[in-house]
Every structure is written in C-alpha cells, then in structure tokens.
Amino acid sequence: MKMEEEKRSNGGYEIIESCTIGSTELVIGHDPKAPNPYVCWYCKGGGNYFWGTYCDTIEAARENLSERYQRECLMPLQQSLCPEARERAAE
C-alpha cells in the first residue's frame, strides 16, 4: 500500500486487505467496535461492496477470502488468469 493512498472504508469497516483476480476484487474490512469485527466482501469499482461474510477473527476472514479466491480461479472465464487453476486442471 502506498503511503499517500487514501484509506477505504465501508459501513464503518476499514479495508485492511485486498486482492484482485481478473475483474473481481476481494477485500477484508475491520471494525473493532462491531459484534463481528471482520468482514470479507466482493468489491466492484473500488466502492461497491457486496456479499459480505462477517467473522469473529482475522483468520476466519482470511479463510473466507481464500475460499472465494479459489472459487474465482475455477470459474471458466478466469482460468487463463489463475495459474493455480491451470495446474489443477493439468493433474
């Protein structure tokens, strides 16, 4: 993350991690005051957050992000962008 980059947030959750696969961005947000302080969302256009999964721990949020990432890799249109999916298909 660049120092001059502005922090993003959604619904009181600060975006603390993100990854992109194809045109899909996956993010993790954190709000220490929330009952479930971590959330994993899909994000389009840098500000349209949807399909949130709320979690008690950062580990659970990262696991959810990883599962979503793997699911995106397996989608037919994304396979050319995801080396892991190509390797699995070759086995």
Image (cartoon, rainbow, N blue to C red):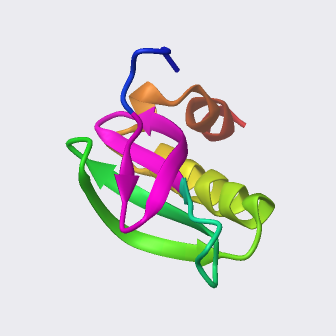
Q: Quadrant of the C terminus?
A: top right
Residue 29 located left or right of residue 7? right
Q: Specify the quadrant of the image occupied by residue 68.
A: bottom right
In this view, 62 is above or below 39:
above
Hey, which quadrant is residue 46 in on the image? Answer: top left
Q: Residue furthest bottom?
A: 35
Q: Residue 4: x percent and y percent?
A: 40, 15
> Is residue 58 in view?
yes
User: From the viewer's perspective, is 5 left or right of 28?
Assistant: left
Tell me if 22 is positioned left or right of 64 in this view. Answer: left
Question: What is the chief secondary structure element of the magenta stretch?
Answer: strand
The percent coordinates of residue 26 (x first, y second) are 46, 48
- Image: 69 above or below 53: above
Which residue corresponds to the image point at 28% horizontal and 37% vertical from the top-left? 23
Residue 61 placement: quadrant: bottom right
Query: Which residue is drawn at the image coordinates 58% and 78% (left, top)?
Result: 34
Q: Position of residue 40 (x, y in %)?
A: 53, 62
Tell me, yes or no, whether the highlighted magenta stretch contains residue 82: no
The stretch in magenta equals 7-28
Residue drawn at (79%, 59%), measured in percent from left and top?
Answer: 59
Name the residue: 63% across, 59% down. Answer: 67
Residue situated in front as seen by the camera: 69 or 4: 4
Q: Is residue 32 above or below residue 79?
A: below
- Image: 86 above or below 56: above
Q: Return the residue nearer the eye: 57 or 85.
A: 57
16 part of magenta stretch: yes
Tell me residue 89's x, y (percent): 60, 39
Residue 49 in the figure: left or right of residue 75: left
* Residue 74 in sight here: no
Q: How many marks?
A: 0
